[in-house]
């Protein structure tokens, strides 16, 4: 059960954020409008949303999910691999101190982005990606174990982050794209496969009895209709231009 979320308003520097997508430059005004609609969607899910001020020094800082992992027992400050994002963790620490008694940190040489961490109950799947290395994943798993939770690694080759391609959408059910559809790591789950043309729609957020999905992915929507959750569609097209999905835009706990 989640009760809170943290988001960060995008700054104008958003337009020079990192991207490998060939979808053009985000329109800043439209991004702001979409951000407000995203916050409204989180509020509809019953969450208290803390809105942090824009930080122009970091173009990608609106993707606040990547800088920390928030668990029921502790928060872990991540260590982004992208040089332009490394400094984003500085300002999230004092914010999380208001909510958490126990805060851990990923240390060099480890790198880890929160987008690579998928929680399913007490277990955390940790993607080994261009952003998260083995040292970072091992540190995270060791920290989780100290707090009575568990973790395991999943190689990621086709997507920026683990959760770019796979997210939990119901009890024991994953929405999976590309390499995750048939990955034996997830063989105990029921898999809802995402057709390749809708890969960018695989990143959903399950919050309590609601499910947030990105607008513009009709087949994903069709797959989700019977999952027993109320669906809330959010248009985040401007963030998709920077490889961002729904989960990236908030920390939920
Ligand atoms: C980046 O490349 O770091 C940002 N432009 C996008 C981050 C997306 N975050 C996520 O998937 N958790």
Image (cartoon, rainbow, N blue to C red):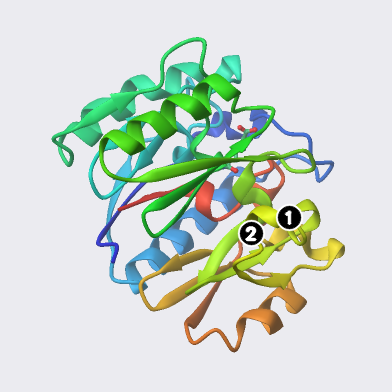
Query: Which quadrant of the view contains residue 24?
Result: top right
The answer to whether 94 is drawn above or below residue 161 in the figure is above
Looking at the picture, tell me which residue is in the foreground, 220 or 150.
150
Q: Which residue is mark 1?
A: 183
| Callout 1 secondary element | loop
Give residue 165's position: percent from left, percent from top. 69, 53
Q: For this view, does 141 lie left or right of residue 179? A: left
The answer to whether 62 is drawn above or below residue 31 in the figure is above
Q: For this view, does 176 lie left or right of residue 108? A: right
Looking at the picture, tell me which residue is in the foreground, 249 or 72.
72
Q: For this view, does 103 lie left or right of residue 186? A: left
Q: How many numbered circles does the render carry?
A: 2
Q: Residues within 10 Å of mark 1 (few under 14, many from 20)?
A: few
Q: Work out how far the residue at label 2 is from the one at label 1, CA to CA, in angstroms.
A: 6 Å
Q: Residue at x 85, y 61 (%)?
A: 196
Q: Which residue is mark 2?
A: 186
| Callout 2 secondary element | helix
Q: Decide: marks 2, 1 in contact (CB < 8 A)? A: yes
Looking at the picture, tell me which residue is in the foreground, 133 or 21.
133
The answer to whether 162 is drawn above or below residue 173 in the figure is above
Image quadrant where one finds the N terminus: bottom left
Q: Residue at x 55, y 56 (%)?
A: 246
């Amino acid at each position: 059960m989640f009760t809170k979320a943290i988001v960060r308003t995008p700054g104008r520097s958003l337009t020079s954020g990192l991207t490998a997508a060939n979808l053009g430059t985000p329109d800043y005004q439209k991004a702001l409008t979409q951000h407000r609609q995203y916050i409204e969607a989180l509020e509809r899910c019953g969450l208290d949303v803390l809105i942090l001020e824009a930080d122009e020094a970091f173009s990608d800082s609106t993707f606040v999910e990547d800088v920390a992992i928030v668990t029921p027992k502790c928060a872990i400050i991540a260590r982004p691999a992208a040089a332009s994002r490394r400094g984003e963790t500085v300002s999230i620490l004092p914010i999380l101190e208001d909510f958490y008694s126990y805060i851990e940190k990923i240390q060099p040489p480890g790198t880890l982005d929160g987008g690579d961490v998928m929680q399913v109950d007490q277990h955390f799947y940790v993607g080994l990606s261009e952003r998260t290395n083995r040292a970072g994943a091992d540190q995270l798993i060791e920290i989780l174990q100290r707090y009575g939770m568990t973790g395991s690694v999943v190689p990621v080759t086709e997507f920026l982050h683990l959760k770019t391609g796979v997210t939990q959408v119901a009890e024991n059910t994953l929405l999976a794209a590309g390499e995750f559809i048939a990955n034996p790591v997830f063989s105990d789950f029921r898999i809802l496969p995402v057709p390749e043309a809708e890969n960018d729609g695989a990143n959903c957020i399950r919050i309590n009895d609601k499910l947030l999905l990105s607008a513009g992915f009709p087949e994903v929507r069709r797959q989700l209709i019977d999952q027993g959750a109320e669906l809330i569609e959010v248009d985040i097209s401007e963030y998709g231009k920077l490889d961002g999905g729904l989960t990236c835009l908030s920390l939920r706990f």
